[in-house]
Image: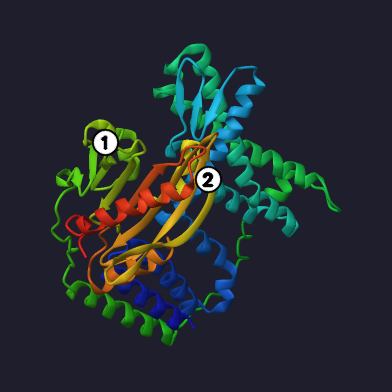
């Protein structure tokens, strides 16, 4: 079984190497290592050390699309709890998504403050503590699982403290050394809470004991004098696995390094601002969002459609008031962590609530020989409503499912040596009192006019 596990790890490695999706290679290493332990020492030794081996999985980052979704949710949660703490201290504050408005200034709870930089290290520390915590299984499970709420609450507390210090000492309290020092202090406080929790758990139950006894590290007694040792013969599996690893080494060195194919395309800087009856005006995205999204090219523009000639204006054309906001982000490569951020994860960060989310056909519009389908979101903030269409245009496919994208990303990396792709999003206001059908028609009209242009900028 160990030999088969090593073989499976090597197959994973070569799949990761050919597709240059590094996370597959990282998992392959741990799988192969576990297989080698099983092959060389047998199941008895593996049963003794499987926990330290499993701990290696904590060193592998989450897949980027999972990280982004989790990050967005934790940002919102940390913002809400942090603002509750600020209000508890009798400070007036307004929260809109991830923006904390103190009146004198605004604080943005960015991705770096989502708590994941606390969560992963603290969960790793809690896992080690639970492993050495010689108590009932439920107590060990509580120690590990409790690292999640501890992290969320303490990260929110840190955001609240930053808001309070900014209120009294100015924006310098949210920057530089003080900001980083607060982060260090809060993490150490998280570790201290974990120790206090273990102390409390050791005192309850049928067998209460001091923490040092429950959590103390014990080492094997020295071997008695005269103990005889004998050499262990290397098993056959050692030579089989060794040969497999040498063969895999030779094969990996002989494989040509695959340079990822990045197809030629026109840049969004040249995207037309006049499309049929639509006139556009470009917008510039703030640098903090560019740094977070990590795309290679983007366009952000408002397009307004000309109406029919109006006799009241002497036959001149008027412009519809409600524009369509057109946004597209292009990624030349999605292999190294730079992948598309889904609007369904990012929109709540701006204070908008997703009222409905469904996949709908865009009537009368087709692309790549298939009827066009889009994700349709109705979002609301107070009295304001917006209608959103978005889809993922990836190497000759229009996709709406965020998880199916990951399969095609792997498959196309393996078979085409490409991982380029883009997100396309259309947004229009649907003012209170306006029939949603009018906003829907506005998006469909712009979609039909714009879709033929996209092939120049998003290669098939």
Q: Secondary structure at mark 2?
A: helix
Q: What colour scheme governs how the chains and residues are painted in the rendered image of this protein?
A: rainbow
Q: Are marks 1 and 2 in contact (CB under 8 Å)?
A: no
Please, which residue is most extreme toward the bottom here? 236
Q: Is residue 135 left or right of residue 345?
A: right
In terms of sequence position, does the residue under pointer 1 or pointer 2 come before the other?
Answer: 2
Please state which of residues 263 and 168 is positioned toward the viewer in this rendering. Answer: 263
Q: In x, y percent, where is residue 297?
A: 22, 47
Q: In x, y percent, where is residue 222?
A: 61, 61
Please, which residue is most extreme toward the right here? 206
Label 2, residues with CA under 10 Å away: few <14, some 14-19, many ≥20: some
Q: For residue 369, which quarter of the picture?
A: bottom left
Q: Which residue is mark 2?
A: 73
Q: Is residue 2 left or right of residue 281?
A: right
Please state which of residues 197 and 91 is positioned toward the viewer in this rendering. Answer: 91
Q: Which residue is mark 1?
A: 311
Total labels: the figure holds 2
Q: Is residue 380 above or below residue 107?
A: below
Instruction: Identify which residue is drawn at 20% across, 60% down.
Output: 455
Q: In x, y percent, where is residue 281?
A: 24, 36
Q: For residue 292, which quarter of the picture?
A: top left
CA gap, disc 1 and disc 2: 52 Å
Please state which of residues 22 and 453 is positioned toward the viewer in this rendering. Answer: 453
Instruction: Identify which residue is drawn at 18% across, 67% down.
Output: 258
């Amino acid at each position: 079984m160990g030999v088969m596990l090593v073989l499976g790890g090597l197959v994973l490695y070569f799949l990761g190497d050919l597709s240059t999706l590094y996370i597959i290679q990282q998992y392959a290493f741990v799988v192969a290592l576990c297989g080698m332990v099983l092959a060389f020492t047998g199941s008895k030794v593996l049963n003794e050390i499987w926990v330290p081996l499993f701990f290696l999985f904590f060193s592998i980052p989450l897949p980027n699309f999972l990280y982004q979704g989790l990050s967005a949710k934790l940002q919102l949660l940390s913002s809400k709890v942090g603002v509750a703490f600020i209000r508890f201290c009798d400070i007036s504050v307004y929260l809109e998504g991830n923006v904390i408005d103190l009146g004198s200034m605004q604080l943005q709870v960015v991705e770096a403050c989502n708590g994941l930089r606390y969560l992963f290290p603290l969960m790793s520390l809690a896992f080690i503590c639970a492993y050495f915590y010689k108590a009932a299984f439920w107590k060990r499970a509580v120690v590990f699982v409790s690292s999640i709420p501890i992290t969320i609450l303490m990260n929110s507390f840190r955001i609240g403290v930053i808001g309070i210090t900014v209120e009294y000492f100015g924006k310098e309290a949210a920057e530089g050394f003080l900001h980083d020092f607060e982060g260090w202090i809060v993490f150490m406080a998280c570790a201290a809470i974990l120790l206090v929790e273990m102390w409390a758990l050791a005192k309850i139950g049928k067998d209460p004991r001091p923490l040092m006894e429950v959590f103390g590290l014990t080492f094997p007694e020295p071997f008695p004098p005269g103990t005889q040792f004998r050499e262990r013969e290397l098993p056959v599996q050692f030579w089989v696995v060794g040969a497999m690893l040498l063969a895999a080494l030779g094969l990996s060195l002989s494989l040509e390094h695959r340079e990822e194919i990045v197809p030629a395309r026109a840049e969004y800087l040249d995207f037309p601002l006049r499309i049929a009856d639509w006139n556009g005006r470009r917008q510039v995205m703030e640098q903090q969002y560019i740094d977070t999204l990590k795309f290679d090219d983007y366009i952000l523009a408002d397009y307004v459609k000309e109406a029919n000639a109006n006799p009241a204006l002497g036959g001149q054309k008027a412009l519809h008031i409600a524009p369509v906001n057109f946004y597209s982000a292009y990624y030349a490569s999605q292999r190294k962590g730079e992948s598309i951020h889904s609007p369904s994860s990012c929109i709540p960060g701006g204070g908008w609530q997703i009222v409905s989310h469904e996949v709908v056909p865009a009537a009368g519009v087709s692309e790549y020989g298939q009827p066009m389908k889009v994700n349709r979101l109705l979002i609301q903030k107070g009295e304001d409503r917006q209608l959103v269409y978005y889809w993922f245009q990836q190497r000759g496919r229009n996709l709406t499912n965020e998880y199916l994208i990951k399969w095609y990303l792997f498959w196309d990396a393996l078979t085409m040596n490409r991982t380029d792709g883009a997100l396309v999003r259309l947004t229009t206001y649907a003012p209170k009192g306006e029939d949603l059908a009018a906003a829907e028609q506005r998006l469909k009209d712009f979609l039909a006019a714009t879709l033929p242009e996209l092939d120049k900028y998003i290669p098939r």
